[in-house]
Every structure is written in C-alpha cells, then in structure tokens.
Image (cartoon, rainbow, N blue to C red):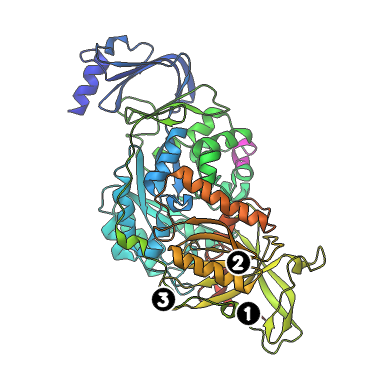
Amino acid sequence: MLSQTLVDVAMGRKPAEMVIKNGVWVCVQTGELLPQTDIAISAGRVAYVGENADHAIGPQTQVIHADGAYLVPGLLDGHMHVESGMLTVTEFVRAVAPRGTTGMFVDPHEIANVFGLKGVKLMVDEAAKQPIHVWVQVPSCVPSAPGLETPGASIGPADVTEAMTWPGIIGLGEVMNFPGVYMGDEKMHAEIHATTHAGKVIGGHYASHDLGLPFHGYVAGGPEDDHEGTCAEDAIARARQGMKPMLRYGSAWQDVAAQVKAITEVGMDARRFLLCTDDSHAETLIHEGHMDRVLRHAIQQGLPPVTAIQMMTINTAEHFGVSREMGLIAPGRWADVLLVRDLENFHAETVIARGQILAQDGKWQRDLPAYPYPAWVRQSVRLPRPLTGRDFRLSAEGHDPLATVNVIGVIENQAPTRRLRMEVPVEDDEVHLPEPGSAPQGSPLSDVAKIALIDRHHNTGKVSMGLVSGFRLTEKCAIASTVAHDCHNMLVIGTNDAYMAQAANYLLEIGGGQVVIKDGKVIGQVQLEIAGLMSTEHASIVAEKAASVLAGFKACGCDINNPNMTMSLLALVVIPELRISDKGLVDVTRFQFVPVVE
C-alpha cells in the first residue's frame, strides 16, 4: 500500500527513488522559507521533507543537488481555457510545464459550444494522458446566454449530472449567465444543484459592476469563485461574501494590478485570493510564460514572493478540495517540485511532476506523444456558399445622408466593451464608412470598422452586421476568426467588404483559424483545424503562426495589445456593454437586442 511505502521511506527502511538535497523549502502551508531542506520521493509522492534525508538514499536512488535553490510547489492555474492558447491539451502542457506549471483547472466551454458534451469528453480523455495534473470543469453555460445566440451545441442539467460522474471532473465551469442565477432560472439552478449534490466546486463569472442586490443574489446561488473583477472594490466584495477572487493576468485581460490592492493596501488576507490566467495566447506562452509570468507580475505589484506563490499553489488546491494531493510540498502529496534560483525573477530551473523530472532549463526531458484526434472534430466550419462583398452590406434605408448608430467600443486589456453612439454617412441606403485614413484625425469615424458574425455551425450562411471602434485600422484590410467566444461562430472585422468576404472564405477553405487580409493578400494566418479553435501542431509552431496574425493586425494600423484576443470576445454576450451575436447586436447591461442603426 502507498501509505506503507511512504512510511518505510520516511523511516529509512526503504530507499527513496529520488532525493533532492540542500534546498530552501518554500513552505506555503506556513509561509516560511526553510534552508538546508531535503526531500525524499517515492511512488511519485513526497515521503519525507526535512533537514537530512540521507537515511532514504540507497544505491539506486537518484540524488539531485539543489545547492541552495528554492524548492517551490508546482504552480497551479485555477481558471483557464486551453482553447484560448489555440493548442490541444497536450500542446498546451508542452508549452507550460517547462515553465513550472504542474496543474491546471480547465473549463472547455469553447469546444463545448461547437460539439457539446462529446467535445468536453474528448478534452477529459486527453487531460488524463498528461504528465501533469489537468482537472476539467463541466461547462455550465452552453449557450452562454440562451435566446441571444446560437452555438453549435448545447449542454443542460442532464449533461452536467452525467459528467459529474466522470473521473477528472472537478466541478462546474464558470456560471456566466449571472442574470439567470439571480432571476431564478431553472436550468442554471438545476446545474448548480447537480454540482452541489456531487460535492464539487461551482465556478463563478459575475461580469457586472452592480454590487447591489443582483450581486448578493448571485453569490447566494452558489458560485464559489470569480475571475471577472476589474478593480479593488470587486475583489473586496467577493472576498467578504465568501467567494475566492481569482485575479487574472492573461494575454489581454490584466486585472491583477487593480485588484491586488485589496491585499497590499486594504490588508485583506491573501489566503482567500487566487491567481489565474483565464486566456493565454500561444505567442504569450512561448515568449513570456504562463503562471511564472503571472507570478513575476504579481510580485511587481507589491506582493511578497511567498504570498504570490501561495495564491497559485496551496490557495488553489484548497479551493478545489485537492490539497491532500497537491499545492504544497508535504508528505503524501504528489512530488510536484520546482527548483528556482530567484523567487522574484522567477524561472524554473528544474521541473519535477509526480516524482519525474519533466524539464531542465526549459527543455523537456521526456517524450510527450501527440493525442490522436478523431476525424469528426476537424469538420466544424460549414457555409452553404462562398460569401461576397454584398453579404457585408449594412443597411440604413431611409436614413440618407446620416444615421445614428450603436458601435461596440473595445477597451484595451479589458474584457468589457463600451456602447458608443455615433453619426455615420449613408449612401444608397447603406452605411458608407470613410476610406481608411481619410477621416479627419481625432474624428470618431477615423476608428470605426465593420464587424460581422457569421453562422458556421448550422450551414445557414446567415451574416449579422455591426460596427466596432478601438482597433485603429488605417488600411484596407479584414481579419476573420473562428475563435469567437463563446458561440464560436465566424467573426470578421474589416474596412473593406470584399476583403471581409475573402477572409471568411479563406477560413472556410482551411477549416477554421484566424487570417489577416490586406490589399487582397493573406499577410497572417494560423490554421485551427480542431473545432476551429485549436491546432495539433507544436506550441512553438502555433506561436509563430499566431504571431503572424498579430503582425498582420499591426500592418493594418492596429497597435493595441493582443488585438486578436480582444476581437475574440466581441461575440461574448455575457460581458457588458455591447456585443454581437448571430441574432443581432446585444446590450448586455439589459440583455436586450438593440438596432445597429437607430
């Protein structure tokens, strides 16, 4: 039995398989740094941690000399979407494990919106094959806002109840339909009940600035964490109501600096807070990092290194009820240990997961075979015919020469948008935007482009049109993407109707992904053949191709941070203020459709 083996190693009756000598133990359970510490490992678990483990060393024991390096528990990401990295689970692990991530809590609601429960099961099965810990949450809101969008599939209470019995399921994914919770929607409460009955964690997503009765009603419904806060007041309110604020620092949504003040200035107990990424772009993962990147940033905001490490190790493990297994270096836990020379400039020198050395100096030390995806998951982009420029006409009949329009206003590095109102010119009964670069500098019209949401799931060819501001496109161009949270229909923005059609048709041809068209030529593209969301290629290759999309945005005049991730949220009809769906323009503050042209 495992317990007997660990006791025998701890007592010196059996040799350990691995012993780490002379490190500084980052003891997250007490907040201490303890020098001259050894760790004895057997059966992938910690058997002994203390001043001297020589009694556990035998002829076959692998001895690692830490030479004073810090011994840090493996880092855990408490909330994230693998699909946002444009990578499969395997390739995401390939990218992040060498940087010190040894556990992830994954909500696969992206693939669920394309393929439903069978898509979730595919992710669960792949997660089980990984050399690190990948827990999966059952998506709760597919669609994210019933009646306001049409995804490729749906998930209901019966599906949630079934999935709660699967090995590897840790809880319910972020409950994005927050009005449904506080208004007593039966579907949402049935899913929450199924999760509670299974004894698992309910993920939160309260994307509203209203901290009055709706917020209190939402918390009373059962969600236990929330990553949608954007200011210190949000974090404070959630912590006081018993939720775990998840401070996120992804590629584009960067809310740590504002919310961490609840700890550094207000003095709240950091053990109630978690750190997460939510959405990380492949290019970010390869060139900047994953949870190690979050850790460095959090420390720069004034958190003590040990506190920041607690927020992505033991805090996360305790929140999900797995601290008996991981999240700290202690006997009986999985031996997930990082050797690190500098806690503030955090880079993992050696990564050990489940008692095996996975990476050394950022390089893999073992094989990580690709996961065999079935053919059906590669067939997700359906249009009845190629599109033309006429499909992107925005009607304004009867409004000649000017029309008042509602425009989606993006906010750099934040998920929320603004609802803007502008006057635009009308010619021949359609909105006629100025040629790129021709509007007077400083004019609102100098930064307005068309946006289209195209049904790619049901072969209807339906195109929903709108306007967007904030990308600062100055060239004749178009960008198309089958990554369009959460319905993941095809999203296109552009300053030229013909190029918008060209971009959409290109994605139809390659089976999904992202593409940038400028002056009629493809200048950036990444193919995402798995559900139109993920590539099976290695993370470094995907990162290179994704970087070409970012370069394409820049060539079109867009200079905002990670614009493709900002674009991908423009169809997410659960985050205020204004979004687009296949059914029209949605005012998310009221959950009502509004006209583009008033």
- Please tell me whether residue 87 is drawn above or below residue 179 in the rendered image: above
**Contact, mark 3 vs mark 1 (Cβ under 8 Å):** no
Percent position of residue 245, x then y: 51, 46
Describe the element under mark 2 as helix, strand or loop: strand
Question: How many numbered marks does the figure carry?
Answer: 3
**Contact, mark 1 vs mark 2 (Cβ under 8 Å):** no
Q: Residues within 10 Å of mark 2 (few under 14, many from 20)?
A: many
Residue at 56% in and 44% down: 249
- Please tell me whether residue 384 is drawn above or below residue 338 in the rendered image: below
- Please tell me whether residue 578 is drawn above or below residue 270 in the rendered image: below
Whole-angstrom CA distance, mark 1 to mark 2, is 13 Å
Is residue 596 shown left or right of residue 291? right
Q: Quadrant of the N terminus?
A: top left
Q: Residue furthest bottom?
A: 398
The disc, 3 or 1, on the residue closer to the chain's N-terminal end is 1
Residue at 80% in and 67% down: 443
Q: Residues within 10 Å of mark 1 (few under 14, many from 20)?
A: many
Residue type at mark 2: give it: Ile
- For disc 3, the marked residue is 459
- For disc 1, the marked residue is 394
Q: Is residue 265 magenta?
A: yes
Describe the element under mark 3 as helix, strand or loop: loop
Residue type at mark 1: give it: Leu
Residue at 38% in and 61% down: 112
Is residue 213 shown left or right of residue 509? right
Residue at 53% in and 63% down: 214
Percent position of residue 350, x then y: 43, 25
What residue range appears in magenta? 260-266
Residue type at mark 3: give it: Asn
- For disc 2, the marked residue is 493
Is residue 413 shown left or right of residue 143? right
Nearer to me, 90 or 151? 90
